Amino acid sequence: MMRIRVPLPRRFCTLAAAALLITATLATSACGQSQGATPASGASAVNPDSVLGRADRGRMKGAEGAQVTIIEISDFQCPYCREFAAGTYKQIDSAYVRTGRARIIYINLPLSSHQQAFSAAEAAMCAGAQGKFWQMHDRLFATQREWSGQADAVTRFERLAGELQLDMAAWRDCTVNDRTASIIVSDAMQAAEARINGTPTFIINGRGGQRSLSGAVPYDQFAREIDAVLNGQPAAPGAQTPPAATPPQP
């Protein structure tokens, strides 16, 4: 498999000890989700009405028939992911997702250097099992400075869940018993083949080709890449591109 070789962007959280990776296969399977393909998490034969099925579906936003799928590989404790969520993401959501031109799928990559990142991912995925992943996503990033590095982070996540008026008994059962942990681990395992070493990282996938971006990319740059995929424009020489797709692994 071809290795991605790109300069390390400045606004980028990295994993110090080992690279965590993701493949273009993930983009392919995600685009096929509505046709009954393997879930974006990589889990096979998952009951769509189960906690795992609902959580996996909940982190997908936008029209199933959108021309472009944006795979966002992110860490809730990464400050540059917060920067993206506060700015560029909202503009993409307004201009592309809500207009039906793009779909976005959130892939968890909790870095080992961020002690609360995995718990934050579980908080969001368990909210997603109740159809409120993106609402929890927004609150986690908006309050990141309040809970990041704090011993009582989980208590703070519970407060956010309460604000979203979730079924708290179900949400607590989901988080305490790690009901969605397998999806998060699978996300990281699928990340093991493309040698992307930090967050946020994005794969833009569509009939017009595939592009990748790394770091808290400004909206104008992101929009150019989305438009290029929508219009079928070939990537410029030296542009960041994901590796060739490989068949999904069981």
Image (spheres, grey):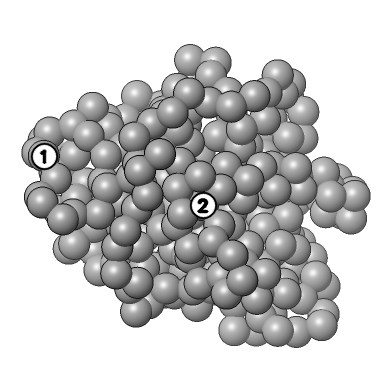
- Residue at left offset 72%, top offset 74%: 115
Q: Quadrant of residue 189?
A: top right
- Quadrant including the N terminus: top left
Indicate the secondary structure of the residue bearing disc 1.
loop
Q: Which residue is mark 1?
A: 234
Q: Position of residue 132 (x, y in %)?
A: 62, 48
Q: Which residue is mark 2?
A: 21
Q: Amino acid at mark 2?
A: Leu
Q: Position of residue 48 (x, y in %)?
A: 68, 23
- 119 relative position to 217: left or right: right
When the figure is inspected, residue 222 is found, relative to residue 81, above or below; the finding is above
| Residue 204 visible (yes or no) | yes
- Residue at left offset 23%, top offset 27%: 207
When the figure is inspected, residue 37 is found, relative to residue 220, above or below; the finding is above
Q: Quadrant of residue 170?
A: top right
- N-terminal of the pair, mark 2 or mark 1, is 2
